[in-house]
Image (cartoon, rainbow, N blue to C red):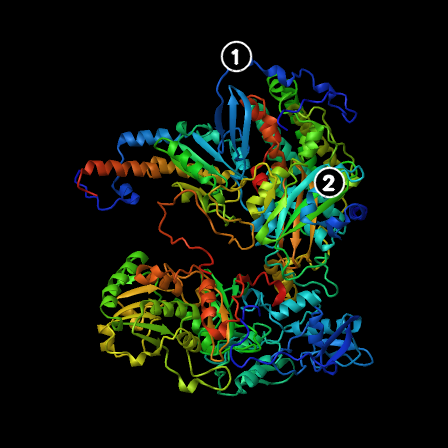
Amino acid sequence: MGLELTTTRLEDAAKWAKQSTLDRASNWGRKFSLFTYPFVTACCGMEFMSVAGPKYDIARFGAEFPRFSPRQSDLLMIVGTITEKQGPALKRVFDQMTEPKWVIAFGVCASTGGFYQNYHAMPGADQVIPVDVYIPGCPPRPEQVLDALIMLMDRIQSGRGHSQLRTKRDQLIAEAGPGEG
Amino acid sequence: MSAKVLDALKAAHGAAIDSVETQHGDAIAWVVRDRLLAVATWLKSDPAMAFDAPVFATCIDRLDWKPIDVPPGPPVYPASAGWTEDRPRFEVVYQLRSTRHRHRLRLKCAVPEHDARVPSLSSLWPAFNWQERETFDMYGISFDGHPDQRRIYLYDEFVGYPLRKDYPKEKRQPLVRRDDLPINPIKVPGGHR
Amino acid sequence: MAAPSTPTGPGDASNRSLKQLVLGRRDVQDLSDTEQELPSELMTINMGPSHPAMHGTVRIVLTVDGERIVASDVQPGYLHRCFEKESEYATYTQVFPYTDRLNYVSPMINNCGWAMVAEKLMGLTGKLPRRAEYIRVIVSEMSRMTDHLTCVGASAMELGAFTPFLYLLKCREWLYELLEKVSGARLTHSYVRIGGVGKDLTPNFDAELTLCLDQIVKVMVECESMLNHNKIFRDRMAGVGAMSKDDAIATGCVGPIARAAGVDYDVRKDYPYSVYPELEFDVPVGTTGDCYDRYLVRIEELKQCIRILRQCLKQIPDGPVMVDDPRVALPAKAATYNTIESMIRHFKHIMDGIKVPAGEAYAFVEGGNGELGFYVVADGTGRPYKAYVRSPSFVHLSTASQLIHGHLIADVVPIFGMINMIGGECDK
Amino acid sequence: MTDVVKPPIEAPKPAPVPAPPSDSVNLTIDGMPVTVKKGTNVLEAARTLGIDISAFCYHPGLQVVAQCRQCLVSVEKNPKLQPSCQQTCGEGMVVHTTDPQSTLARKQQLEFTLLNHPIDCPICDKAGECTLQRLYFEHDNADSRVDVTKVHKAKVVDLGPTIVLDQERCILCSRCIRACDEVAGDHQLEFAHRGDHQILTTAPGAQLDNPYSLNTVDVCPVGALTAKDFRFTMRAWELEATPSVCNGCATGCNIEIHHKHDRAWRLVPRHNPDVNKYWMCDEGRLTYHELREHRLAGALVDGLPAGWDRAIRAAADHLSPILAASRQAVGVVLSAEASNEDNFALGKLAKAWGVGSVYVAARPDVPGRADGRLRVADVNPNRRGVQLIAEALALGARPIAELSADVRCLVMLGAELPGVAPARLAELGIIAITSHERGAAAGARIALPAAAWAEVAGTVTNAGGLVQRMHAAFAPPGQALPGWEAVVRLAQATAAGAAGKLSYTHAREVFKDMTQTVAAWSALVWAREARPLALRFAGSRG
């Protein structure tokens, strides 16, 4: 594969990545069977309940099944404020999930820290792990969450999730052989 | 009702009480630090007081206390006498309630910065166990005789006491190294003093 | 407090309607089925900080002998968002959103508590328009309902009963929609203001709430029939995590937990505030202080909430919803844009904050979990010098170690469910 | 102020003699007795009691004109209301400020003032620190009663190089006119027209261009006069204030640094009756721009970036052989622009090394600058301090222009070596401890980044010998450290550190050592650190 990898940026992996039919098929399967690990910490959890509850019903999108073991889940929903004390736990949960995995930052606290800018609130979960979709709102409305889920599905289908890209990049580097990169 | 409690307290423990005041109907008694445990024991056991229920314990850091727009006339705050520039920096506050008499009382203890200790009341009211740990965690007040004085909200690696007025609000002490982040020089707010 | 407290017997005089419902209880000691086995080593197990059965985030380091808990270290703080530090940097009005996120299951009550402490410092207590007081009670009681609905529903779900969870969540959704119509936000309302409330109720709020309550009553009948005599539910709840009356008082417990243990203490009755003296309601009190009694107390409080709400809808007068005091009330928008006087006043209120005279005060309300208080030291500026929240969850969680002592690991789940530890409130 | 280090070292003022009884008068204000010095006006007397009488035109540093009529009070046995700023306290006088008559008069006066005031608060630079806003909010707070069209005037009048005037916002208090007259001694502003068409203006064709013009912005109670330098840059209430001392010249005006987001946004004068009263010059106000220009953020070795450790090692490697060969070959340059602490630490190091020659670098005097007011010819903030330190340490310091031909290596504080020929500079191996990368420091062999004056705690000595305290307002850029700390690191890397004499960890320790060495400063104490005060917390002090 005559690629010259001059950089290891994730965006380039996306550029080089060509989806095979198999990729497309497996990504189609992945996007409709998301197993969620709800990392619920705070107020957003109430809205997460509503999303999972009868009226908004996340089951319509194939993501209703919360798995409380990170090893069995592929979507990490960070629901609520992440604090410095929580950071190691979050990172550990993320590390325990198997590839491919995706992350949604649910609410403004998980995205940027929101109006908690202080010594203990982390300014966004992306300080410690990569995030695929950010949902604004304090807390977001359930409709926003469903919208974010659909956005994530698009991303999964096109193979542009963080972990998909990272896998692709590693693959490309391996194919390019030693001495490159 | 609050006046009755304060009068009884003064009558029984005159020497241990620095001063008493009432603010917005809340009874407040300033207790000499060394006598706090004795006064509290009496408050709990005396049938006329019967402060059986603890409400909260906390601390006030008066580091930059400069009340403004104070109405003219004698100072409304603090009403207790003897307050000058070299006043103690901290005030430890205990709020008590009596289920029988329904009265409430706030005990205050002046605590200087260089000797930030008070006797623990957790042996009298178990609820103060965690409340005092919280006060220790946030203000660095040490409670003599506390069975388990550890940080409660923050982690052991945390340096300093965040609710002190001189702790910068946004001074974070991360537990997870942020390697993947774009390089931001981590600055210590306030710089070199 | 090393040993678990034995449940007190039934027959307490204050027991109104619950004594028939405490049947089928087993004594704590009977639970032992591993007593006669070979001696085993103690094991340390870590629960949390991200655990499905923990409401919010708390970490428990359990030392177990087989399945039995012999020691535990409960570690809160994973959601410490520095309410007090943030409040010192926010104006009194800007603190309302932070209070929303303390007990995020019943934000309106927190709003009221914060407003009341500022009003106490400003000498406005009792001078609010009556309509504002009634609106505050209405939204508070609705919030209390969402709190109890969530607590009961989630606890039931954690014990395997998924249907009541969905039913009760449906009720909560109705209440959220009503509160959204009133305040503009589903969950974090920031609706109450110092000196009144943000805006008036919607025009047909009366009919909508009545309809909503009627439906909730029906759903509650369904849920109670599913839970009250459900064998699994009762076996998991009754006799679990019991607390004596004396312990409840000494450990500072309040609200449903203390009332389940027989402590007849409700801020709305004992230190009446707002228009509660004009409303008729009962305070349910349990006898044994175990999880099942806590469940029953919450269910009964839900019914009392409905009773209060129906009275409020009948009694609420017309009139303004904000006190007529330029120190706290914002001018009308039209005047703000067209006259310099109102513009200045608006500017000063928003940018400098409402000036609260120097002093200190402690004001408290009956929150979803009990006495929720705010202790504020003001220095005359528009921002609190110190703001402390007396959070019932924190006090209740401090008893958890003692409540789960001697129980099985599985019992941790109902005990924590019924303590109803709310992370935002507990960790501040 | 607590952070002015007292007493002054030269010509100490005689201790204040207790005022004889005849020098004070007793009066009663709102039922409260008060004793004040003879000649005090009622408004100031009331302020000592905590009674805030509203006023626009009164300024304690300016002449009293009593033209805004906002401070009217009732004085018993006086049929008419009296302006309290002009009313001198008399023995036995009984003053009322809360009686219905005077309260109403003040309220109505405020209503008149607001009559034509534009609804500009959201776009006004003064909003948040505006006296009109404060007085309305605290003393009136009533709704508008008028429904007439406001008189319109010019919104953007360019008064000169520094100031823009909004005539609509002007409330005609004349403070700015008096500030020009009394502070700058230059009558450049005047009122024109009559009634509600009256405006503030300069003479036709003339400009407001005196060197103290920006003081008019400070005294303006509303947002009529705004500084071109500051307008539309930052919200006043979001700034934080840290007390410090102006480093623009040898006067040492007391200032507040108003800062946010780790940079200064403006400097404003801070009241000090012994130095600058309420004022400072325009040039001094604009010195904060230098804090962001040509800054050295990291250590450089031969012009290339290096970490602190590498740079210090390189400096030690460079110095040690030269020092070992000949003490005469190394020169140390103290700087009249650096603080006492930095100079003292470097002076001590020079002693420890035993170098042959010590010099003082200072910016040359600007002869036309001195005006007998605040501006002086010497534009170095600390020339006097360096002299005293050099004398106390017996360094035999000479001006840098007398640089000896033997010197092959210079260890210098600051960036400039005025009076040294460029050719000579090129052959010197310079080790510079500097906040800015310019002048001689730009060609230094090793440049160590130092914090600038607004970023560190320290003291400077003004021309009168007054030692004044500066506080750190914000963090220095990049890896910059306080100058004395750089000196300590340098000392520890060379043999001098072994003596243990230079092991300071805080400016306080340098100061303490310095006061023990410099006899004239033996009575000085290190003032407590001042924490930045957010202007918003100042609330309504406007």
What residue is shown with label 2?
B97
- Local crowd size for mark 1, using a 10 Å CA cut-off: few (<14), some (14–19), many (≥20): few
| Camera-nearest residue between C41 and D378 | C41
- Local crowd size for mark 2, using a 10 Å CA cut-off: few (<14), some (14–19), many (≥20): many
Q: Tag 2: residue type?
A: Arg
Q: Is residue C424 above or below residue D320?
A: above
Tell me the number on the disc at residue C37: 1
Chain name for mark 1: C
The N terminus of chain B - image quarter:
top right
Residue at 51% from the left image edge and 44% from the top image edge = A137
Q: Position of residue B173 (x, y in %)?
A: 45, 47
> Seen in the image, is D420 located left or right of residue D209?
left
Q: Position of residue B96 (x, y in %)?
A: 71, 42
> Seen in the image, is D522 located left or right of residue D444?
right
Q: Tag 1: residue type?
A: Glu
Res A168 quadrant in image: top left
| Camera-nearest residue between A127 and D424 | D424
| Camera-nearest residue between D158 and A174 | A174
Secondary element at image label 1: loop
Task: Report, in whole angstroms, how far the alpha carbon at label 2 lies from the one at label 1.
Answer: 47 Å
